């Protein structure tokens, strides 16, 4: 049996190749994502471990910022002198590190990264742990000199002697590049600008006696843990106001901050792997089902020669495991190549990771083979059971087990039960009033309805394809009629083939409806809320210095200017909940630039000193009423008792802003969170000034500030559309992968179907069917199968999308939009996919020798 199995596998290796490709893709994405994330994690572990001081002292952050406020927490630089006297301390240095800078060249173009990584200004304090070394030029001296990292200099064509403008929280100032530093470790993608310490303190912090941290080096023989204890003892009662970390703790903290970015990449890759696995299962099931149907006589002979059911089942599963073994091995190799490609891509984005330091831990190949072998084993199990059911008499009767005539009653029952459960979950999602429960029911409903559609898919083949292919006989005559009947011949096979495409298109249909609804909701909310002629914001929403606002106020044609800032707060609610959220601060003229609907109170009450406003639904959930006083904690452990002055009824407070929709007067914010920068400035034109003239004036004024954008309502909508499009691009990428595997499935089905119908094709050719007609028949069969999968997928996706919109409605996104143009385009694209998938099988069928085909058994 083992010899027979191996010979059978080698005899059908061509037919199994397409199934192997599905396994390869699945394993490649799993292995590639693990290798890439392990490599990046190991690289940054080394970077942070090699550059962290033995003990680092920083101001304690009482709240993790949810959005950048522009505040920089500081401590006294003199603390370094105090700590240098502690026994066991070899040296202590005051450090200055400030993110969120903008550096512009003489053409007023930003020289910072374009990938979202920050531009960091830091004091030049070279030590043996520094991540960079001075490779050309000299160290900075005075407030007009800086060093810049070599990667930024090369990418932005900056040279020693060039004049730059640095725009920080204290304003802008000119500098000259006097040296270039080169990374000795991995470049994390940020742009680094080095100043002398005095300049960094005065120009970046606005405090000549301040620092952002103290780095402490241990004397020989003193451990980091012991040094941390001694530093804490020396600080005494002040220790509670600082964060003390050893080198290992600091490295771990830095890695955790980077972890979100790495997790996004990892989970996106695993998402691709999941789609590949799911769609690949359909392909493998179909392949083995058809191979077994074609080998009925062979399996019957094995049974007649003495093989029992267990041996036949084991033989088929062994073939599947061999397929999984080959696919997993090739997929692991492809995953290594994919990881190298991702590393190179990160290099283009500024994150220079060395490919020769790539990490392939034991978990990666273990996971790769578990996925590859597991997928093929599970997919081949049912076909293997069917193979074991072949009777010895099948060899004499030349019967097939193509399951053409087997009833679908069990599928109907199972599909109905699972579908009913899925429909109930989706209905529950639609009527739920809580976001968390609605989202859970949505996930359950999506899963169950997908399973139900896969199970019941063959039941829908005959009624749907009769409609989809109903025009074929009239358009293509007998060829069209035969193509339609070929698709109807085996509903199980047609359903399984179409299911691969259905999964991808259901995902796209659902996300397209959700994204279109989000876009429409945002547009409606912007139209309702925004009343300013223009909004000035940083391009990446990082706050900008007060200097920018002052320049705006001095611009000709500017009438009203309303500033806003953001801050992270924690509010203790009457029901005992402590809610951490982002709050906004506005100037008193807010009504002039925004349209706010109040359930109770008004803008004057909301922005009064010591007051705040919040969304009425959020207030009801936590038992808050107008007039209540709430304890509010700000960064730096500053605390306030703020009175609820107003409740808003904006419909979209949750969906379009931070949790709770909390805001207060800018005076209140600056009292408890001083040092913040403006996040947005709302501008109205002066009387007699047109919008076009004002925009031109603002753009001219803001030309020296490349990070700042001037937007009107249309620009604001475009910005939102672009952000939503990022999500859609990911979905479309998943669709592309699903289509690739689905095309492989259709090609495989048609190719095996051509082999199965060799004699039939020979007879058709013998009675006068031309080569062109034969190719057309196979192409039409492929098209109707692909369109059937598209119709099922889009119908399912439409239901998912509508239910998703109901969940979004609980967050204020109440508009429902269905992108019919996208739906029609997907159906047309599916027909094209069907034509492409049929090209090779149709060509092969048309080239068959007629007499050899008739004689084929």
Image (cartoon, rainbow, N blue to C red):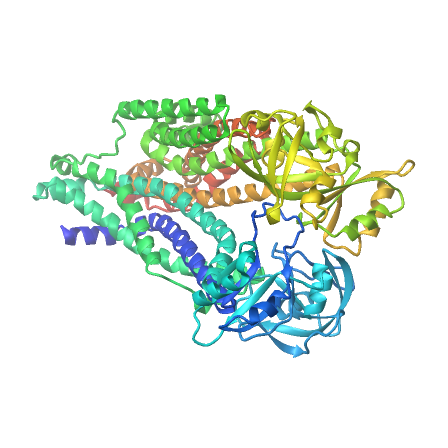
Residue 749 coordinates in the image, percent (x, y): 35, 40
Q: Quadrant of residue 136?
A: bottom right
Residue at 55% across, 41% down: 728
Residue 444: give x, y in percent of width and height: 40, 30
Near-viewer residue (288 or 725):
725
* Residue found farthest to the front: 237
Left or right of 707, for residue 804: left
Residue located farthest toward the left when viewing the structure as drawn:
306
Q: Is residue 399 left or right of residue 760?
A: left
**Residue visible at 61% across and 40% down?**
582
Residue 262 seen: yes
Q: Residue drawn at (50%, 29%), measured in percent from left and top?
A: 435
- Between residue 720 and residue 784, name the one nearer to us: 720
Residue 786 position by quadrant: top left
The residue sitting at 48% across, 42% down in the picture is: 735
Q: Is residue 476 at least partly visible in the picture?
A: no
Classify 119 as above or below 550: below
State the image coordinates of residue 649 (x, y, percent, origin top left). 65, 25
- Residue lying farthest right? 688
Q: How many marks?
A: 0
Please state, as top left, top right, bottom left or bottom right, where the C terminus lies in the image.
Answer: top left
| Closer-to-camera residue (664/316) | 664
Front residue of 781 and 709: 709
> Could you tell whether 206 is left or right of 82 in the image?
right
**300 w.r.t. 651: above or below:** below
Residue 274 in the image, given as x and y percentages of width and height: 40, 44
Q: Quick check: 145 above or below 118?
A: below
């Amino acid at each position: 049996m083992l010899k027979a199995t191996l010979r059978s596998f080698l005899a059908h290796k061509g037919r199994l190749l397409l199934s192997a490709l599905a396994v390869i893709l699945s394993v490649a994405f799993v292995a590639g994502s693990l290798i890439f994330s392990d490599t990046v994690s190991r690289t940054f572990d080394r970077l942070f471990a090699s550059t962290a001081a033995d003990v680092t002292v920083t101001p304690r952050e009482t709240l993790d910022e949810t959005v950048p406020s522009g505040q920089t927490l500081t401590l006294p630089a003199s603390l370094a002198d105090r700590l240098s006297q502690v026994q066991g301390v070899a040296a202590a240095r005051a450090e200055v590190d400030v993110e969120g800078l903008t550096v512009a060249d003489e053409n007023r173009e930003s020289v910072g990264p374009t990938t979202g990584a920050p531009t960091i200004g830091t004091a030049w304090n070279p030590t043996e742990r520094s991540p960079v070394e001075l490779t050309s030029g000299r160290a900075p001296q005075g407030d007009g000199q800086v060093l810049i990292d070599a990667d930024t200099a090369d990418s932005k064509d900056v040279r020693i002697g060039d004049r730059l403008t640095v725009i920080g929280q204290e304003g802008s100032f000119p500098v000259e590049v006097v040296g270039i530093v080169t990374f000795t470790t991995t470049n994390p993608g940020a742009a680094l600008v080095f100043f002398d310490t005095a300049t960094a303190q005065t120009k970046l912090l606005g405090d000549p006696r301040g620092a952002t941290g103290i780095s402490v080096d241990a004397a020989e023989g003193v451990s980091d843990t012991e040094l941390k204890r001694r530093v804490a003892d020396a600080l005494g009662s002040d220790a509670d106001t600082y964060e003390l970390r050893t080198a290992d703790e600091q490295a771990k903290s830095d890695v955790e901050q980077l972890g979100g970015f790495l997790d996004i990449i990892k989970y996106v890759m695993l998402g691709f792997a999941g789609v590949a696995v799911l769609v690949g299962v359909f392909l493998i099931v179909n392949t083995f089902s058809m191979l077994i149907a074609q080998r009925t006589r062979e399996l019957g002979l094995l049974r007649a020669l003495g093989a029992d059911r267990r041996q036949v089942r084991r033989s088929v599963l062994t073939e599947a495991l061999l397929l999984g073994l080959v696919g997993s091995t090739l997929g692991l190799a492809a995953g290594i190549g994919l990881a190298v490609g991702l590393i190179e891509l990160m290099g283009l984005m500024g994150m220079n990771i060395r490919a020769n330091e790539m990490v392939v831990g034991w978990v990666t190949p273990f996971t790769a083979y578990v996925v590859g072998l597991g997928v093929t084993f599970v997919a081949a199990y049912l076909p293997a059971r069917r193979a074991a059911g072949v009777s010895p008499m099948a060899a004499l009767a030349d019967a097939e087990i193509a399951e053409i005539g087997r009833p679908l009653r069990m599928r109907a029952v199972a599909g109905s039960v699972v579908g009913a459960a899925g429909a109930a979950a989706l209905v529950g999602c639609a009527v739920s009033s809580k976001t968390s429960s609605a989202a859970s029911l949505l996930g359950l409903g999506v899963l169950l309805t997908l399973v139900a559609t896969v199970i019941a898919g063959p039941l829908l083949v005959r009624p749907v394809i009769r409609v989809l292919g109903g025009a074929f006989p009239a358009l293509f005559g007998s060829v069209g009629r035969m193509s339609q009947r070929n698709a109807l011949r085996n509903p199980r096979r047609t359903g399984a083939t179409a299911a691969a495409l259905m999964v991808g298109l259901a995902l796209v249909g659902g996300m397209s409806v959700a994204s279109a609804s989000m876009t429409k909701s945002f547009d409606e909310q912007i139209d309702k809320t925004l009343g300013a002629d223009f909004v000035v914001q940083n391009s990446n929403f990082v706050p900008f210095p007060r200097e920018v606002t002052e320049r705006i106020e001095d611009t000709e044609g500017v009438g009203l200017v309303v500033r806003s800032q953001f801050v992270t707060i924690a509010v203790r609610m009457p029901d005992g909940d402590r809610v951490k959220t982002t709050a906004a601060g506005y100037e008193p003229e807010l009504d002039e630039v925004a349209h706010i609907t109040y359930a109770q109170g008004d803008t004057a009450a909301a922005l009064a000193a010591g007051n705040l406003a919040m969304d009425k639904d959020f207030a009801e959930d936590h038992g808050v009423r107008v007039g209540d006083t709430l304890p509010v904690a700000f960064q730096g452990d500053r605390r306030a008792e703020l009175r609820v002055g107003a409740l808003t009824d904006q419909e979209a407070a949750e969906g379009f802003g931070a949790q709770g929709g909390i805001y207060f007067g800018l005076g209140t914010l600056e009292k408890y969170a001083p040092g913040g920068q403006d996040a947005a400035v709302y501008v109205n034109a002066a009387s007699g000034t047109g919008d076009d003239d004002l925009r031109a004036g603002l753009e001219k004024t803001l030309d020296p500030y490349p990070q700042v954008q001037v937007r009107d309502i249309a620009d604001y909508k475009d910005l939102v559309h672009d952000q939503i499009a990022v999500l859609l691009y990911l979905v479309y990428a998943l669709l592309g992968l699903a289509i690739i595997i689905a095309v492989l499935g259709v090609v495989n089905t048609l190719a095996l179907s051509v082999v199965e119908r060799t004699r039939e094709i020979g007879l058709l050719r013998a009675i006068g069917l031309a080569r062109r007609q034969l190719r057309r028949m196979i192409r039409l069969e492929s098209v109707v199968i692909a369109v059937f999968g598209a119709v099922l997928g889009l119908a399912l996706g439409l239901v998912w999308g509508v239910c998703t919109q109901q969940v979004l409605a609980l967050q204020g996104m109440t508009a429902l939009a269905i992108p019919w143009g996208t739906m029609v385009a997907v159906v047309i694209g599916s027909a094209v996919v069907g034509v492409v998938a049929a090209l090779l099988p149709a060509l092969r069928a048309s080239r068959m020798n007629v007499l050899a085909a008739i004689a084929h058994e």
